[in-house]
Amino acid sequence: MTETTTSLENTPLPDKEGRFGEYGGSYVPEQLQAVLDEITQSYENIKNDPSFLEELAALNQHFTGRPSPVFHCKNLSEKVGGADIYLKREDLNHTGAHKINHCLGEALLAKRMGKKKLIAETGAGQHGVALATAATLVGLECDIYMGVVDIKKEHPNVVRMKILGATVVPVKRGTQTLKDAVDAAFEAYLEDPVSQLYAIGSVVGPHPFPMMVRDFQQIVGIEAREQFQAMTGKLPDNLVACVGGGSNAMGLFSAFLNDKDVSIYGVEPSGRGFKDGDHAATLTLGKPGVLHGFSSYLLQDDNGDPLPVYSVASGLDYPGVGPQHSLLKDLGRVNYVTASDDEAINAFFELSRTDGIIPAIESAHAMAYAVKLAKEAGKGKTILVNLSGRGDKDIDFVIENYGKDFGI
Ligand SMILES: *Cc1c(COP(=O)(O)O)cnc(C)c1O
């Protein structure tokens, strides 16, 4: 029998300064550091508090609908003719993706710290919707900072946030997209760090966010490990997840890091190609640097300024990546690979038409690599994919831009 590695205590990183090896840490003004220290302290106090864990577990079960199932994708596996592909169905969560897992945790933490308001940035609006949902549920106000370009592009999610009672704050500076929204949200946070909590959208940002968001996402891996063993009697041979900031990937990977026989793949978007500005393959093509208060691999120019990034999946479109992924890359524990726009769109239609599951375009990147890997690994092997979200949010965009190629 393999030992279980499912408790939070079995993942000893980061250290007290929030470092994962040389990555992570906290590069922020003194005033903000004092606030972050307070969040770290509160989190350390509640993370083993049975009443907090029970409250979160009850919401996970009765509100989100956890545990999400593991599904054996028989039709796709047969069609590919190689390894058997299994999906961890995070797309079935309330609000349609894995993000609700850490939003509920962050909202409960804010409530216990006596905060009045949650604030955050959002790109495509997925994090904004999940956070607005969690804020309403626990009784907090919610301000979501969003670039004007994204507000125009992501109309349904903007409306969702407003219906849920959140305030959407338009960000008009810079390129008016995700990076500018993060900058604006940080500034708003500094203006009133006492009554607000910044609930970051992935395993990025200064300590304690990469640790905290990972801990709240670990439920994905903990459940999947048990479910997969119950279904097959073994651990999966391979794990695959898409990597934007890296939260759904860390959630799945964390429970298997000590299982040396499990190969792990993080899939980054290679977009339109490998030229600067055409992709967001941070670990594949970046170099260590500092952005948004933490150190990690970063797509940057010669002055250390972030490069423009692009992917068909807005949720993967970020020039940085969670610091623990940078360490896992250097250690060689996780293989970071890529899938292009076209490969992801093909996988989007393939999974829809073999097994009746429309994946988020982000998750379709993981599917695209899983299909490739299934052919290489061959029959008798297994692949567990984190299906991080559902594709309802993407259908209009996909049909407008790719429908013809797929007979629609
Ligand atoms: C936001 C999002 C992602 C990317 O975020 P990670 O932090 O890398 O997990 C992936 N899939 C879906 C469905 C998303 O909404």
Image: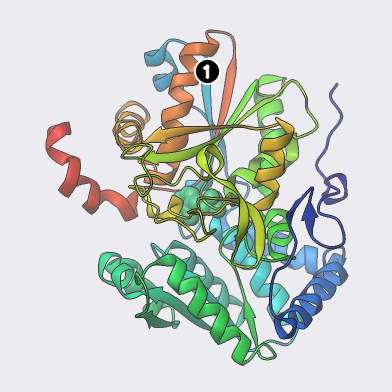
Residue 41, percent from left and from top = 85, 74
Query: Which quarter shows the C terminus?
Result: top left
Q: Describe the element under mark 1 as helix, strand or loop.
A: strand
The residue at 43%/66% (across/down) is 178
Q: Amino acid at mark 1?
A: Asp
Front residue of this view, candidates 278 and 50: 278
Q: Quadrant of residue 26?
A: bottom right
In the figure, 322 relative to 270: above or below?
below
Colour convention: rainbow
- Where is residue 119 shown, x and y percent of the image? 55, 79
Residue at position x 60%, y 91% in the image: 191
Q: Specify the farthest residue to the front.
A: 302
The answer to whether residue 167 shows anywhere in this view is yes
> What residue is drawn where x is 58% and y is 49%?
246
Q: Position of residue 329 (x, y in %)?
A: 66, 37
Vertical comparison of 195 with 93: above or below: below
Image position of 400 (left or right of 127): left
Camera-nearest residue between 70 and 19? 19
Which of 165 and 403 lies nearest the eye of the viewer? 403
Mark yes or no: residue 226 visible.
no
Q: Quadrant of the N terminus?
A: top right
Residue closest to the far top: 379
Height in image: 367 above or below 317?
above
Image quarter for residue 334? top right
Q: Rate crowding at label 1 as few (under 14), some (14 to 19) or many (20 or more) other CA atoms within 10 Å.
A: many
Q: Is residue 207 above or below residue 191?
A: above
Q: How many marks?
A: 1
The residue that label 1 is drawn on is 84
Q: Quadrant of residue 348?
A: top left
Residue placed most toward the observer, 206 or 222: 206
Residue at coordinates 54% horizontally, 86% vertically from top-left? 188
